[in-house]
Amino acid sequence: MRIQNGRLVTIENGTFACGYVDFEKGKITGFGDLADAPAYEGEVLDAKGGWIMPGFIDAHTHIGINEEIIGSPGSDCNEKSDPVTPDMRVVDGVKPHDGSIARAMRAGVTTAGVSPGSANVIGGQIAALKMRGDRVEDMILKAPAAMKFALGQNPKGVYGPRNKAPVTRMAVAAIMRKTLTRAQRYAAKLDAGEDVYDPELEALVPVVKGEIPVHFHAHQGDDILTAIRIAREFHLKYSIVHATGAGTVLKYMAEEAAIPLLGPLGLRVGKPEMRDLSFDVAGRLEKAGMEIAITTDHGVTPLWLLPTYAGLCVREGLSEEAAFRAITINGAKALGVADRVGSIALDKDADLVVFSGHPFHWLTKTEAVFIDGQRCK
């Protein structure tokens, strides 16, 4: 199939005022300036002067695991029975027919990182899912894609009132260190051929070997720095999720190669550690030399608002190019799936969206959505 006659934004391979994209069997086979396009005899979709883009990506959501409308019976986000649950797999709690998945897809979101919540110090395994499918197996792009860790008030607030660790931020960090040290020793025993098995430590082996990243829930500056400190100690790949107080520790974050997942930005300040909440932090991080990604933290705020948040960040100082990267390739990088999605390139998944106008404009409509080359809208 070919999509043509629209402004083509590839993210990593240029922008074409009037471009085209070809795809077959779910993969991109060609793209570029329409004037240079080879003759084509297959099905053609006319973008009618709109915009052609890769599908949007939010690397941190709870979509499908906190099912909308259902309330408590549909909430499978936080296993609050123990502060360390790395063997919890988010795919075992996802409801593929959660109505918010289709709504996100219709807004142009084709991939989401679905994560356990932040009640636990180590919450479980994050999955990268496509926004279509009748069963979770049909949605999986990568699982596990990352491991959820949490600092700050959330784990304190869950376990402190029970007089159970962690009661303090010191305990949160200590639990992380103790568990990671145990995981390193466990991995060494496996490598030595010892017959050992522990499901919690088994789940952390890809983390301590650097095969998947940690996504650290952290709002305020001191928690962000604790995450960086622990990541350095254990040589972890990582991202900071939320990073509300990033503006207070800009210079230290800029020393790192990690991509922060900023957000959710469009809500009231609900607790003291979110006191620095602002749309302008994205632009400040860009000026400090950092790549960023934007998150809605669905269901704190709806996933379909992802392009709206990116546009508001542009209004407050983020460049348009960085904003496009923040909801495409950078989210893919944070999930370890940039070889498959996040930009328009040869042999990548044909996850493509056609918009009637600029994707950040409030009057723009989503005209067509393709996931793995299949039209979903």
Image (cartoon, helix red, strand yellow):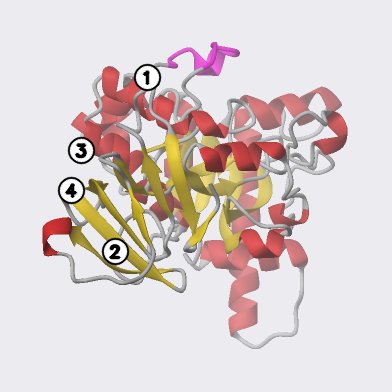
Residue 375 or residue 262, whichever sits in front: 375
Q: Amino acid at mark 3?
A: Gly
- Residue linked to disc 2: 345
Residue at x-position 66% and y-position 57%: 133
For the residues labelled 1 and 4, say whether their Cβ atoms are less than 8 Å apart. Answer: no
Q: Quick one: label 1, few (<14), some, or many (20+) residues within 10 Å?
A: many
- Residue linked to disc 4: 18
Element assignment for label 3: loop
- Residue linked to disc 1: 279
- Residue linked to disc 3: 289
Q: Select label 4 or label 3 by which is in front.
A: 4
Real-space Cα distance between discs 1 and 2? Answer: 30 Å
Real-space Cα distance between discs 2 and 4? Answer: 17 Å
For the residues labelled 2 and 4, say whether their Cβ atoms are less than 8 Å apart. Answer: no
Real-space Cα distance between discs 2 and 3? Answer: 25 Å
Residue at x-position 35% and y-position 20%: 312
Real-space Cα distance between discs 4 and 3? Answer: 31 Å
Q: Which label's residue is closer to the chain start, 3 or 1?
A: 1
- Eyeballing the image, is 219 above or below 239? above
Q: Which label's residue is closer to the chain start, 2 or 4?
A: 4
Element assignment for label 4: strand
For the residues labelled 4 and 3, say whether their Cβ atoms are less than 8 Å apart. Answer: no
Magenta segment, which residues? 267-277
- Eyeballing the image, is 244 above or below 26? above
Q: Amino acid at mark 1?
A: Phe
Q: Position of residue 297 (x, y in %)?
A: 56, 33
